[in-house]
Amino acid sequence: MVRLNDRQRQRLERFRVRYFPMLDPNIFRILSKKYAFRKLINYLIVEFQAGRRDAHAFGKPYWLTIDPTNFCQLRCPFCPTGMDRNVRTKAMMRFPEFKKILDDLGPTLLHIDFMNWGEPLLNKEVYDMIAYAKKFDIDTNMSTNLNSFSPDEAQKLVASGLDCLVLSIDGLTQETYGKYRVRGDYAKVLEHLKMIVEARRKAGGFKPYIVWQFLVFKHNEHEIEQVKEFGKSCGVDVVGITPAYMPFKPGIRENWIPTKPEYRMYDPATFPDSPPWQWESSAPSAEQDPSASVPAPSPADASPPETAPTAAPPPDIPWERILKAVRKFKKRLTASGDDAVPDVKVDVYKDSDQRKVCLWPWAGISVNPNGSVSPCCSVEEEEYDFGFYDKQSFRRLWNNPRYKEARRHIRRYVDGQIDVKARSAHACERCFSIGKSNFTFPAWWRFTQFDWWWGFSDAPPPASPDKQNTEKR
């Protein structure tokens, strides 16, 4: 082993900061130890280009979010699926479609999340998908509400080789659990959890690593200390206490944001009642909620208000359809040029003055059940997707005009040259969360216990931290 002196270490660190500012030394170390040189080279290329914020990407994503299905039996109020918004095509991904994606990306992938807008366990082929991913030596993670399960499925889950299982349980009683997990059955979830713990015990292994995911809201923050003890008594490996992402809607500040500052994602003083792309002085269109409170923008960003005809229109003229068409045309027109799109400063986060690079356009890819590719795992509406995986080659998809514009916008945003483009038709340009939700590798990648996890050491891993950023909703 080559040993470096202090001067050499300083030079090496200066080189890393300059050319690989976001590189994780633990990931570099583990890939080197495993002789996974193809994954390592791709990881270095991606980190180098993300650090430079290049528009054309030569590397492949090392992080994949794949949605086995966007059907769900629950009605969580902050989820577009739970709210039944119908902003995405309902679909169930099949194994041959998943295999095609893995054959393209598997050799360079480090991590896969098997969930996004639906309940993954409703897709009965998900166990085969996980097993196939493990053939490429990929870390696998799945988040579930665990309301639909059986003993046979518990055995399949353990046998699939899944590395980490995140259980979305946001309460210790049916009352607190059911306030957000609407239609969920708390007693049934605990019963299913016992099945998984027992199946893992019978298999004699330590996978999957089980995380009790507790999203903190105002109504359940009093249970935080209790859930840490109770979760461990149920056989889970760690209880993750996580601040929740919330929509900009009336009533959220008063009824949902926790009172404890350490569990808030947002600054309550600046939390708005509508998203930034509605921050304009024009009257709400037919598609908007007329009761929504829309903050007025600064005079420089204001656009002329749209006024309806004062006189009653003749009955034979479809004025509503005409006005709707005019609004749609104006929206496209204003989104076509930078001069017509207002910039909006968004100060709803606690650290809103810090601008960080979003790694998604370089390092991550989010594939939906119907094959459409989203800018990231947080884009709800299908209209903002960047293309379809099965309708063009990956290289053409990965460097199409939408992806390149996303990378250019992030470069300008991080450099302070531009703010959120509130009325842009591009999802990344109107995003108010750039750099707020990047990839969090699991404990065995981030700490020394990865030596034990991958078999490099006989010592068991130490206890994991309480806070885990494993779920966005």
Image: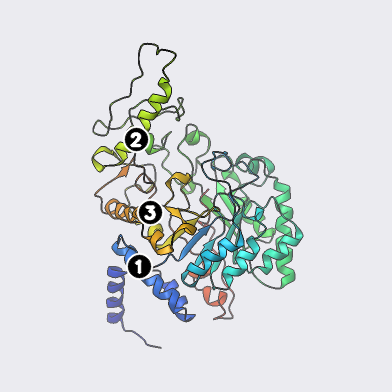
Q: Given contact means CB atoms under 8 Å apart, are the residues at marks 1 and 2 in contact? A: no
The amino acid sitting under disc 3 is Gly
Crowd class of label 1 (few under 14; some 14 to 19; many from 20; radius 10 Å):
some
Q: Secondary structure at mark 2?
A: helix
Q: Quadrant of residue 332?
A: top left
Give me the disc on residue 58: 1
Give me the disc on residue 435: 3
Quadrant containing the N terminus in the rendered view: bottom left
Q: In this rendered view, identify the residue nearer to me: 406 or 221.
A: 406
Give me the disc on residue 331: 2
Whether residue 284 is visible: no
How many numbered discs sit on the rendered protein? 3
Q: In this rendered view, identify the residue nearer to me: 278 or 325.
A: 325
Q: Is residue 165 above or below residue 386?
A: below
Give how far across and how far down residue 71 sits, in percent: 61, 47
Q: Is residue 141 above or below residue 183?
A: below
Give how far across and how far down residue 410 sits, in percent: 32, 53
Crowd class of label 3 (few under 14; some 14 to 19; many from 20; radius 10 Å):
some
The residue lying at 53 percent from left, 65 percent from top is 100
Q: Is residue 305 above or below residue 149?
A: above
The residue lying at 48 percent from left, 64 percent from top is 441
Q: Given contact means CB atoms under 8 Å apart, are the residues at marks 1 and 3 in contact? A: no
Q: Quadrant of residue 267?
A: top left
The amino acid sitting under disc 2 is Lys
Q: In this rendered view, identify the residue nearer to me: 121 or 184.
A: 121
Q: Is residue 3 above or below residue 398?
A: below
Residue 268 horizontal side relative to residue 236, left or right: left
Give how far across and how far down residue 373 sits, in percent: 46, 54
Give how far across and how far down residue 245 sits, in percent: 49, 46
Mark toward the start of the polypeptide (3 vs 2): 2
The amino acid sitting under disc 1 is Phe
